[in-house]
Image (cartoon, grey):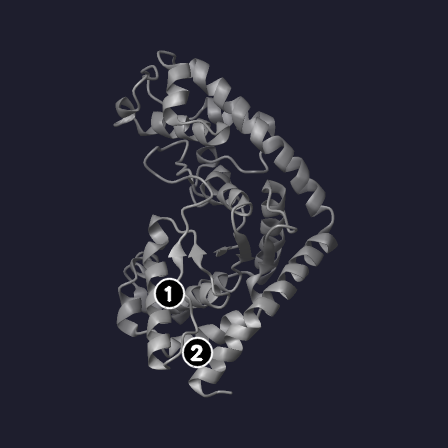
Amino acid sequence: MRVVSGIQPTGGLHLGNLLGAILRWVRMQDEAECLFFLADMHALTIAVDPAELRANIREMAAALIASGIDPAKATLFRQSAVPAHAELAWILQGTARIGWLERMTQFKEKGGKHKERSSVGLFTYPVLQAADVLLYQATHVPVGEDQKQHLELARDIALKFNNDFDVELFALPEPFIGGGTAARVMSLRDGKAKMSKSDPSEMSRIHLTDSDEDIAQKIRKARTDPEPLPEDPALLDGRPEARNLVGIYAALTGESIEQVLARFAGQGFGTFKPALADAVIAMLSPLRRRLDELRADPAELERILESGAERARTLAAPTLANAYRAVGLA
């Protein structure tokens, strides 16, 4: 089993990123051979500040390692350090069909009402995503609800390429359900909106770099309702803020929603919020210290990323060579 997944190097990592994706990666590396990459080429599909992108790449690498990604277990690398990603993506552009890409719901959402102003890269980036996983003969790809369509596209491209050129080159990757459950973390100010760095309110999110005092304050001021916590999880329906805070606590402690409610049933948020703040601080304090250590040694970060890229280039080479041969370029 080989798992491949990428994450865009965006700044301002928060608790939602940690519980929603990063910690799932940490658990995956003990379940399968894993390749994790910083999707810096995908970051170019929208306007980008070069200096900011460079800084974000280092910050994301540091955050992943601080969170528990072990370069001795998983292959961690920068996407752009493996040119085969771009080369295979161009070859696959000849296989993918415009109609397939026009059906991608994420392009419709990101392009908005003025899709003609979007970059070509924003339209075709699902083909690069397909290349990202097909390049390594990935057997499994971890996907959330918003990425299932892109995995289906990767499978369609792989199948059509194999059929068009009468080869059995690309494996058809399956969704990976390992790594435990990813928590869907919502805003601390609005339980119906995802926690996001684009939210204008700093009080809506907890950054991985927030101090213990800031964390406690943000939890204390998080929006809730006046009702006590119920014993039955079904009674959280219609209480999005309460459900969000209970879900965060469960994700941090590894408990189920039922277990959390069994402990706090009948109690108000005056009791629950301090316990939640303690759990968040217990998770983030050691992570923050490790992050500071890694930031202080950028040369070590670069060494880790280059070592991962070297391994990734070695793994990618046979597939790319066979793709060149299949289409007549070699």
Q: Does 47 sit left or right of 158 as displayed?
A: right
Question: Cα distance, mark 2 to mark 1?
Answer: 13 Å
Look at the image and tell me whether residue 141 can be seen.
yes
Q: Is residue 219 left or right of residue 114?
A: right
Which label was assigned to residue 91? 2
Q: Could you say which quadrant of the image residue 281 lies in? A: top right
* Residue positioned 35% across, 58% down in the render: 110
SS class, disc 2: helix
Label 1: which residue? 154
Whichever of labels 2 and 1 marks the residue nearer the N terminus, that label is 2
Where is residue 147? Give x, y as percent. 36, 54
The circle on residue 127 is none
Classify residue 299 by image quadrant.
bottom right
In-image side of 151 versus 249 (left or right): left
Residue at image point 40% right, 30% down: 247
Residue sitting at 63 percent across and 64 percent down? 311
Packing grade of label 1 (10 A; few <14, some 14-19, many >=20) is many
218 and 38: which is toward the camera: 38
The kind of residue tagged 1 is Ala
- Residue lying at 65% horizontally and 65% vertically, measured from the top left: 310
Furthest toward the top, the residue is 266
| Cβ atoms under marks 2 and 1 closer than 8 Å | no
**Residue 163 screen position, x and y as percent:** 33, 77
Above or below, 10 relative to 234: below
Q: As displayed, is residue 45 above or below residue 164?
A: above
- Where is residue 130 shown, x and y percent of the image? 42, 66
